[in-house]
Amino acid sequence: MTAPFLRFTLFAFTALASAASLRAQTPAPTAEQLKSWVPIRQQRVDLLRDEIKQIDARIESRLDVIVETLTTISDSKDSRTKIARMKEETGKRLAKTITYYDQKRAALKEELRSPRLRLTDEEKRRMIAAFDARIEKRTQQIMALNKSMPAHEDHERYKTTGGGWWGTEYQRNEEYDQNRRMTSHNNTQRDAMVKQFDASIARLDRQSRTLKTQLATASDPVQRKTLTDELAKTDALLAERRQQRVETVKPSSTPTHTVALKEAYDMDKAMQTAINDLRRDFTAMFERYSTFLNELSSLHATEAALGAKTGS
């Protein structure tokens, strides 16, 4: 063992011993200190909660405008499939947010089973319900986009242009080609949605069976009520997802008006700006959310320490 390594090891052990000694010498906070910390931490929690609500409201408002606009328009022969591609890309982005919300929801469900943060079960359930609401809204928005895609129409591949020297003349039917382009995008989007619904249905079905197994062995009345409520919600959502899958494969029924190429290009440009703004807001909101969870946990920890000090 070399001399420099021995010196480094001695230094490391000395530093660790000094840190441990310093922690041991640091007095525990008094009741008065804890009491003064509670409103400060409560204020941080309230500010973060308000920020999250404001950003969320801004995201929802922008998405509402985008989806409502796209569901009322469709491509013309001039714009070909530009609007269809915008709908398809929007649907994919909405599906990604569902995945992200579901991950956050799953983390809170795990918190209910194995608490890591000092959050109440009621707080966790309220946040889970909020994610459930957002997942449901995104699902409805994706379905609305899908319903606004044009359905298959029967057009002749060729149409007559009149008689000529050699008899009847034909040319390629633009209506046939346009509808074929459009339904191709529609089929792609619909197949992706059906795949997502199948995955969701399989997950919910597994969750339902697990809850039934847990309920069969549970004896504590409070636990049984919690499991019964969760099972009812899961089975209701499972039935809804199955119905939504059926609705997805039905023909389109949403009336739309066609847009010209210039209008489609302008909309696409505006969409890209909106998407960039939404991406920044989405990132900011979940950064605040992560900080909010830690601050709320710290608040409850301080309240618990104060209660232990004062016996309240």
Image (cartoon, rainbow, N blue to C red):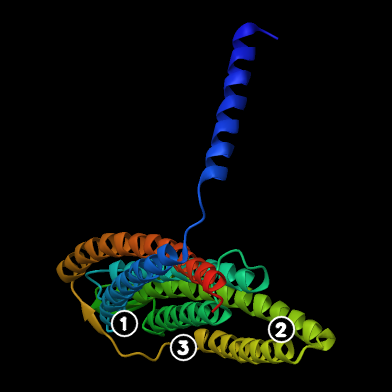
Position in image of residue 150 (x %, y %): 37, 82
Whole-percent x and y of residue 71?
31, 82
Q: Identify the residue position indicated by label 1 in the image.
A: 71
Task: Please tell me which of labels 3 and 1 falls first in the chain.
Answer: 1
**Front-lying residue, 239 or 82:** 239
Disc number lying in front (3 or 1) = 1
Residue 170 seen anywhere in this rendered image of the structure: no
- Looking at this view, name the residue that lies furthest to the right: 217
Picture layout, residue 132 above or below residue 181: below
Which of 95/147 is in front? 95
Tell which tag, 1 or 2, sits nearer the viewer: 2
Quick one: SS at disc 1?
loop
Report helix, strand or loop for mark 3. Answer: loop
Mark 3: amino acid: Pro
Gap between marks 3 and 1 measured at Cα:
15 Å
Q: The residue under label 1 is which amino acid type?
A: Thr
* Foreground of the two, 129 or 31: 31
- Check the picture and name the quadrant holding the N terminus: top right
Q: Is residue 30 left or right of residue 66?
A: right
Q: Residue at x 36, y 60 (%)?
A: 283
Residue visible at 27% across and 84% down in the picture: 72
Q: Label 3 vs label 2: CA separation?
A: 31 Å
Mark 2 sits on what residue? 208
Q: Which residue is mark 3?
A: 251
Residue 159, given in percent of the width and then of the height, sits at 32, 79
Quadrant the C terminus occupies: bottom right
Task: Tell me if mark 3 has few (under 14), some (14-19) or many (20+) residues whose alpha carbon lies within 10 angstroms of its own.
Answer: some
Q: Nearer the viewer, mark 3 or mark 2?
A: 2
Secondary structure at badge 2 equals helix
